[in-house]
Image (cartoon, rainbow, N blue to C red):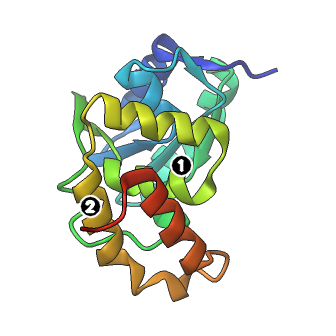
C-alpha cells in the first residue's frame, strides 16, 4: 500500500531518481509536491512531475521507486491540462541539483491557473497560500492568463468563459 508523501519521502524519491539517471535531465514538480516542498502542506497523495527531456531510464525507474518508497507518482503538470505560455522552463523555480538531475517547481503561474481551473477545495487553498507567500501576484496571474487564453480551444474540456470568471474571482478583474 502506498502512503502519503511528506517532504522526506519526496526528497528520498529525488535522490533515488538521481541515482537512476545516467544523463542530464530536469525534473519539474507540480501540485502537492510543490506545496509540500515549499512548506505549506505536510504531505500530498501524489508526486506530480514532468521529465525533460524524455529519458527512458528515468521512466523505467519510476515504477520501481513508487513501490520501494510506497508513494504515488503521476506524470502530470499544467502542460497536460492547459496551454502554458512559452518560457515556462525559465519561470520554474530551482529546487536542487542532485547528480545529473536538476529539480524544479513547474512554473508557479501555470500551476496556479491549472488549480483555479480545477477548482477543488485543496486547489483553492493552495492558490491562496501561493498568494499569501507572494510566490505569485494577482496582476501577473491575470497577465499570464491573458497570454494563454487564446489557446484554450486546444483543450476542449476547459470552458474558457468559466475559467475567465474563476481567474477574475481569484485574482481580481483587470483594471
Point out which mark residue 88 bears: 2
Residue shown at the point (45%, 41%) measured from the top left: 127
Comes first in the chain, label 2 or label 1: 1
Residue shown at the point (36%, 44%) measured from the top left: 27
Q: Is residue 123 above or below residue 160?
A: above
Query: In the figure, is residue 107 to the left or right of 117?
Result: left
Residue shown at the point (37%, 57%) measured from the top left: 172
Q: Residues within 10 Å of mark 1 (few under 14, many from 20)?
A: some
Residue shown at the point (42%, 85%) measured from the top left: 151
Image quadrant occupied by the N terminus: top right
Measured as percent of width and height from the top left, residue 71 is found at 65, 25
> Which of 77 and 128 lies nearest the eye of the viewer?
128
Query: In the figure, is residue 39 to the left or right of 86?
Result: right
Point out which mark residue 75 bears: none
Q: What residue sits right under mark 1 in the picture?
A: 59
> Which of 66 and 57 lies nearest the eye of the viewer?
66
Measured as percent of width and height from the top left, residue 19 is found at 38, 28
Q: Given the current orientation, which residue lies at the most extreme left position?
A: 90
Q: Given the current orientation, which residue lies at the most extreme front position?
A: 175
Q: Residues within 10 Å of mark 2 (few under 14, many from 20)?
A: some
Q: Secondary structure at mark 2?
A: loop
Q: Secondary structure at mark 1?
A: helix
Q: Is residue 147 above or below residue 10?
A: below
Image quadrant occupied by the C terminus: bottom left
Query: In the figure, is residue 24 to the left or right of 57?
Result: left
Amino acid at each position: 500500500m502506498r502512503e502519503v508523501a511528506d517532504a522526506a519521502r519526496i526528497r528520498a524519491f529525488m535522490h533515488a531518481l538521481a541515482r537512476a539517471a545516467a544523463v542530464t535531465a530536469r525534473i519539474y514538480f507540480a501540485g502537492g509536491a510543490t506545496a509540500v516542498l515549499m512548506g505549506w502542506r505536510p504531505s500530498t497523495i501524489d508526486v506530480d512531475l514532468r521529465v525533460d527531456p524524455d529519458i527512458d531510464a528515468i521512466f523505467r525507474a519510476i515504477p520501481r521507486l513508487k513501490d520501494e518508497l510506497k508513494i504515488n507518482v503521476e506524470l502530470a503538470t499544467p502542460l497536460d491540462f492547459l496551454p502554458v505560455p512559452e518560457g515556462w522552463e525559465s519561470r520554474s523555480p530551482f529546487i536542487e541539483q542532485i547528480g545529473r538531475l536538476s529539480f524544479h517547481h513547474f512554473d508557479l503561474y501555470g500551476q496556479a491557473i491549472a488549480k483555479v481551473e480545477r477548482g477543488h477545495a485543496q486547489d483553492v487553498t493552495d492558490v491562496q497560500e501561493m498568494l499569501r507567500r507572494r510566490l505569485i501576484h494577482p496582476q501577473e496571474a491575470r497577465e499570464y492568463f491573458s497570454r494563454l487564453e487564446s489557446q484554450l480551444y486546444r483543450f476542449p474540456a476547459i470552458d474558457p468563459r468559466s475559467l475567465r470568471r474563476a481567474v477574475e474571482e481569484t485574482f481580481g478583474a483587470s483594471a
